[in-house]
Image (cartoon, rainbow, N blue to C red):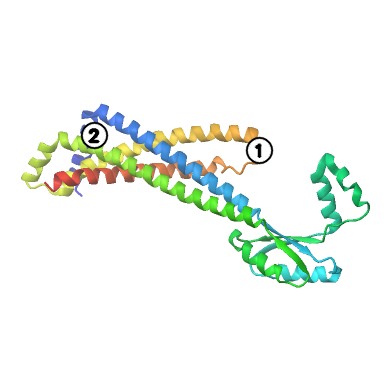
Amino acid sequence: MKISTSEYIIRETVVSLKRNSWMSFASIGTVAVSLFVLGMFLILVLNMNRMTNSLESQVEISVYAKDEVNESGLRTLEERIASMQGIESVKFIDRETAMERFRERLGDQQFLLDALGDKNPLPNSFEVKVRQPEMVRTAAEAIQEMPGVETAKYGQDVVEHLFDITRLVRLFGLALMFVLALATLFIISNTIRLTVFARRKEVAIMKYVGATDWFIRWPFLLEGVVLGCFGGIVAALALRGVYRIIAAKIYDTLAFFPLIPENPFLHYVTAAILVCGMLIGALGSTISLKRFLNA
């Protein structure tokens, strides 16, 4: 591209933005709102994904040994479980520790255990964690078949529902962001279309004297990118402010909530919003010009 051509494209873009200043401001505002909503859902989906990953990582298998298994058998069983593929850790819980935990759980109702006297009906057990949550069912079934194991449980119903919810959240979030991206594309393309319509005679004359489609297209393409970029900047600044406020509120009430830290997360979100805004602006311009250039 020659320097004179580049100067023409930049000058025409600036002139078009100034000539339609109110429309440009309205477009930037509309794009900013659309990208802000898109960004909020992106942040929401990513944080929910982090939360579900945190919940999934806490899924563990409770393995209860048979009463007749002696100390040597328990060590052998622990080694067998630990050697299985996909097992992250195995922690032995003797029956005394299990009873102490049970008493703590009962709190003020510990008197319910008085009838047991010195007897401890709780079995020796293992807390087993897997590397990937999806492996928990297969691992539990394999452990259940081992000699010396009374039962292996992982809260089947709760875990299966948890996996269903996480899949639904991820799919819904992606689908919603796709719809919002299409809505933003529609807004920008219609804004550029109004600009092109106002200059349709100029476009027709340029085509008549032999101007190429790309020579005509570049100023409008750049205008769409500029509108998308400015809208993205406004949306990104608003998102950063809102996220900081929400994060502060959440940490004040739920200090251990697995919220994604601001840095470098907000930098990535800002970059994604800016790139998304410029790409949608360029695509919107291309769609708007197609009809006029093909005429």
Residue 91 position in % (x across, y down): 76, 60
Q: Which mark is residue 20?
A: none
Give coordinates of residue 178: x percent, y percent.
38, 47
Residue 6 visible? The answer is: no
Q: Nearer the viewer, mark 2 or mark 1?
A: 1
Disc 2 on helix, strand or loop?
helix
Classify residue 99 as left or right of residue 135: right
Residue that sits furthest to the front in the current view: 115
Query: How far is disc 2 from disc 1 in space, using C-alphas?
Result: 49 Å
Residue drawn at point x = 84 percent, y = 58 percent: 95
For the view shown, which residue lies furthest in the top direction?
22
Residue at the (24%, 43%) spot, across then down: 285
Q: Is residue 238 left or right of residue 103?
A: left
Going by the numbered disc 1, the residue's amino acid type is Ala
Q: Where on the picture, by quarter, is residue 195?
A: top left
Residue at the left extreme? 209
The front one of 144 and 259 is 144
Quick check: can you spot residue 95?
A: yes
**Residue in the image at 34% along x and 36% along y:** 31
Towards the viewer: 9 or 293: 293
Residue at label 2? 14
Which residue is more in the foreground, 137 or 170?
A: 137
* Image disc number at residue 255: 1
Reply above or below: 279 against 94.
above
Residue 101, given in percent of the width and then of the height, sits at: 81, 50
